[in-house]
Every structure is written in C-alpha cells, then in structure tokens.
Amino acid sequence: GAVVSQHPSWVICKSGTSVKIECRSLDFQATTMFWYRQFPKQSLMLMATSNEGSKATYEQGVEKDKFLINHASLTLSTLTVTSAHPEDSSFYICSTSPWSANNEQFFGPGTRLTVL
Amino acid sequence: RKEVEQDPGPFNVPEGATVAFNCTYSNSASQSFFWYRQDCRKEPKLLMSVYSSGNEDGRFTAQLNRASQYISLLIRDSKLSDSATYLCVVTRDDKIIFGKGTRLHILP
C-alpha cells in the first residue's frame, strides 16, 4: 500500500510556541491531504482539507489563523499550530490517497502534541 | 443529526463469538463506504471497502444497504486481536466523513 509519513511523531512544547507538523506521501503524489485531530478516547475529527497549490479548506469551528496549512508540493503538506496552548494537546493525523478521496485513505502514523 | 452515525459501544464479546455493527448515513448521495480499524494511540487502517454486492474477507463480512442507508460489518469467530475501534467512513464529493467509531472488546 501507499506510504505516508509524519514528522515529528511526538512533540512537547511550551505554551505560546508554534509547532510544525509535516505529512509526506513517500511513493506517490498527493494533490489532496486531510488533517485530523483526535483527543483521548474521542473520535477522529477532520480539521481541514489541504490542496496542493491552493488554500486549504477548513471545517466549521477550526480557526485557519491558528492552524496554518501549507501544501507547497505534491508530496508534502504541513500543519503549523501557532501559539499553542494546553488545550491544543492532541493526536494530529494526516491522510491522503494516490487516487481521489472516494478511494482508500492512507494515514500517517500521527503526531502526539503535548503543550505544557 | 450527524451524517454518519455509529453505536459507540463498547461491545464486550467473548472470544469466538460473532459480532455485528451497523453504521447509518444520512446523505443518499454518498458514494463510497469503508470500514477502518483503529487501535489505541495508532492511526486508522483500512479493514474493508464496502460494495453494493457485499464483500467478505476471511472472518469479516461487510454489506451495504443503499435503500435503508446503512452499512454493516460482521466479525465471525472473534479473536482477542480484534479488540479495537471500528470506524465507518463514507465519502461524498471528495469529502470524507468519519463515524465516531464503535469500540469492541473481545474477552478471553
């Protein structure tokens, strides 16, 4: 199957700092990537859809100025959590597909963010 | 009403038993259907795609009922390793909608 990587796998930071998370498709090109957040014992929640070469589409309730998404190439999307606070501590996961979104999604291994 | 709904469980099932989950979706324009499995603190992984004709993979059977707008997953001869959260996923217009997941605990 297609391989998707995320970096870093975990990060601990102080409140107020910004954290960048990378999502890479390793063996295929991805025009669309999806970013999710999952709090402990809760379900995955789609945050935004990242489109190569254009602006991301954010889900209702997700602040686009707080969660900056850049999809500058066909293999890389980044999510930057700006001025992170403890309530942003969560498991952030990306997914993408070599085909359209109507096909199987391949997920990155996730990034566990802890904001102190 | 949420677009994709699942019983959150947990389902506590003895090893070797058969267990079934349903997932309902509200938008008749939904196009593709999947079951994913997510283990604790891990990313989701595809378990099965769900087709109108139904499909079977070993102990797992998935079915789609477009008229009633639900999909189902049947697990036969359950194993301890089947303990996980099972996510129902529906796509529509290049949008992916996840159910909240059903937690399954297989008891020894």
Image: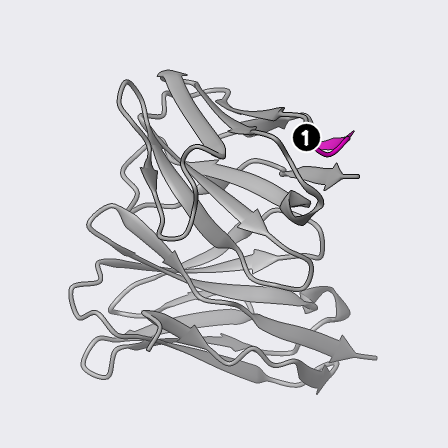
User: Looking at the image, what colour scheme do you see?
Assistant: one colour
| Viewer-side residue, A98 vs B30 | B30
Tell me which corner region of the image, top left, top right, bottom left or bottom right, holds residue B53: bottom left
Residue at left offset 45%, top offset 72%: B61
Instruction: Give the total of numbered labels.
Output: 1
- Image position, residue B102 (x, y; %): 56, 73
Residue at the image position 48 percent from the left and 54 percent from the top: A45
Whether A87 is drawn above or below A116: the answer is below
Q: Residue at 28% of width from left, 49% of height from top?
A: B95
**From this viewpoint, which residue is outermost toward the right?**
B108
Residue B4 in the image, given as x and y percentages of width and height: 36, 70
Does the stretch in magenta take in A14?
A: yes
The quarter of the image holding the C terminus of chain B is bottom right
Compared to residue A95, the image places residue A53 above or below, namely above
- The secondary element bearing badge 1 is classed as loop
Q: Is residue B106 left or right of residue A68?
A: right
Please indicate whether residue B35 sits to the left or right of residue A85 in the image: left
Q: Write down the chain letter for disc 1.
A: A
Label 1 CA crowd tier, 10 Å (few <14, some 14–19, many 20+): some
Residue B67, by quadrant, is bottom left
Query: In the image, what residue occupies the spot 49% across and 35% down?
Result: A66
Q: Quadrant of the rendered structure where residue B71 is?
A: bottom left
The answer to whether residue A62 is magenta is: no
Image location (x, y in percent) of residue B24: 35, 77
Q: Which residue corresponds to mark 1?
A: A16
Which span is picked out in magenta? A9-15
**Tag 1: residue type?**
Gly
Q: Position of residue B69 (x, y in %)?
A: 25, 78
In the image, is residue A70 above or below residue A115?
A: above
